[in-house]
Image (cartoon, rainbow, N blue to C red):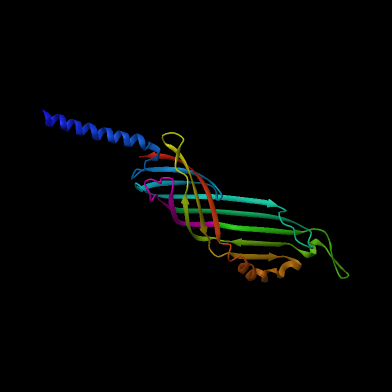
Amino acid sequence: MRKLQLTLLVVLLFTALAATRAIAQPFWEQAYKGATGVQFTVGSQGIGGEFKYNFAENAALRFGASFLPLSANNLFTFSGLKSTNNLSARFSNVHLIADYTPFDKAQWFRLVGGLGYLYSARGAINVIPSGDYKVANYVITAEELGRLNIDVSWKGVAPYVGVGLIRNFSLNSRFTANMDLGTYYLASPRSTIVGTNLLADNYQLQTQMDNNLKSYRWLPVLQLNFSYRITQ
């Protein structure tokens, strides 16, 4: 009888410990091996979506895509040149990202790394002169001067490194949200300069522009993730 009572006491003790641990670690903060989910993302790289798979209790893979279109008019002024200008940018990517949580007691901290392919990564500016220009005794009209288009592309494979800095907070038992902070290291920029009429010779500046832009290869990422867990 005493052995049976002791056995029951041990079982009850382990049951109580397990229940206490479950209460201390809510459902939305647990990491389940094999769990799957989807994420809606919004931030500096635009809007996007991801599929998430936990291949270990403290590690997961994310496969997704994002899209960022931008445009602005008359953002720049050029000394000695009256003009209208149109700026546009488009950055779109597909990516495979890994998350790793190294510390059990710091679930708010994740190491993040992976690769992205930017199938569209370009910025362009179109300059249209306006008014007439007097050069010595000659008057050159805007039509005679021509137009100028400058296009820069960072298309290609880009490694990504970053961290997750905010602990998951629950919107309900399946919806959570957190944040990523990181950067892509882009491919070397390639510029194309196309001018018409008197501006046609500006294509010769492409090499100089590539050299001037060679250090502009870091694309910062600040992203909010809104997740829905499909399976546990």
Q: Image check: 158 left or right of 57?
A: right
68 w.r.t. 6: above or below: below
Which percent across, then down, holds residue 127? 72, 59
Residue at the (63%, 67%) spot, across then down = 212
Q: Image check: 207 left or right of 136?
A: left
62 w.r.t. 169: above or below: below
Residue at the (69%, 58%) spot, across then down = 126
Which percent across, then down, holds residue 155? 54, 60
Which percent across, then down, holds residue 48? 51, 47
145 w.r.t. 6: above or below: below
Question: Between 184 and 191, which is closer to the camera in this rendering?
Answer: 184
Position of the C terminus, as image quadrant, is: top left
Position of the N terminus, as image quadrant, is: top left
Q: Image check: 85 left or right of 67?
A: right
Q: Image check: 12 left or right of 40?
A: left
* Residue 115 shown in magenta: yes
Picture quarter containing residue 34?
top left
Residue extending furthest toward the left: 1
* Residue 35 shown in magenta: no
14 w.r.t. 47: above or below: above
Q: Which residues are magenta?
A: 97-119
Which percent across, then down, holds residue 122? 59, 58
